[in-house]
Image (tube, rainbow, N blue to C red):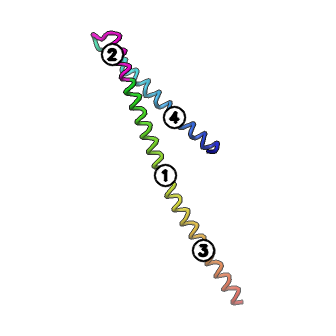
Amino acid sequence: MDTSEEAARGLTDIQDFLYQQAHLRAARRRVAEFTAHEPGLTPVQKADIERWYLAEQTYVARLVTDHIAASVSEAEQRHNARFGHWLRGTLTAMILITVAMGLCVTAVLAGT
C-alpha cells in the first residue's frame, strides 16, 4: 500500500469515527431527554436505560458504517471493471488503427 492509499484509508477511518461519534452524541441527547421526562425512574434505572440505548445505537452505527463501506467497495469494483473494459477496447482500437496505417503506408510506398 503506497502513501496515498494509506492516507485515503486514514481519512476513511477518521470519517467513520466522526460519523459514529456524531451518531452517539445525538443518541445520548435523545436518551437523556427521554429519561428526564419519565417520572418514577430511579437514577439506576435511568443509567441502565441510557447504557442499553447507547450500546444499541453503537451497534446500529456500526451496521450503517459497514453497509456504506460495502456499498462504496461494490461501486468501486464496478467502476474498475467498466474502466478495464473501456481500456481494453481503446487499446484494441489503437492497435487496429496502427496496423491499418502501416498497411496504408506500405501500399503507398510500394506504389511509388
Query: Which mark is drawn over residue 35?
Result: 2
Marks 2 and 4, Cα distance to the nearest angstrom? Answer: 30 Å
Q: Mark 4 — residue?
A: 15
- What crowding class fits label 3: few (fewer than 14 Cα within 10 Å), some (14-19), or many (20 or more)? few
From the image, which quarter does the C terminus lie in? bottom right
Tag 2: amino acid: Thr
Horizontal and vertical percent position of residue 21: 47, 27
Q: CA distance from mark 3 to mark 4?
A: 47 Å
Write down the region rendered in magenta.
40-53
Magenta span dominant secondary structure: helix
Label 4: state its secondary structure: helix
62 sits left or right of 90 in the view: left
Looking at the image, is mark 2 or mark 3 nearer the viewer?
2
**Residue type of the residue flagged with mark 4:** Gln
User: Which residue is painted at 58% across and 41% down in the image?
Assistant: 8
Q: Which mark, by number, is residue 77?
A: 1
Q: Amino acid at mark 1?
A: Gln
> Hey, what amino acid is under mark 3?
Ile
Q: Confirm whether the magenta stretch covers residue 82.
A: no
- 84 w.r.t. 4: above or below: below
Q: List x then y, in percent, for residue 3.
A: 64, 42
Secondary structure under badge 2?
helix
Tell me if label 3 and label 4 are in contact, CB under 8 Å: no
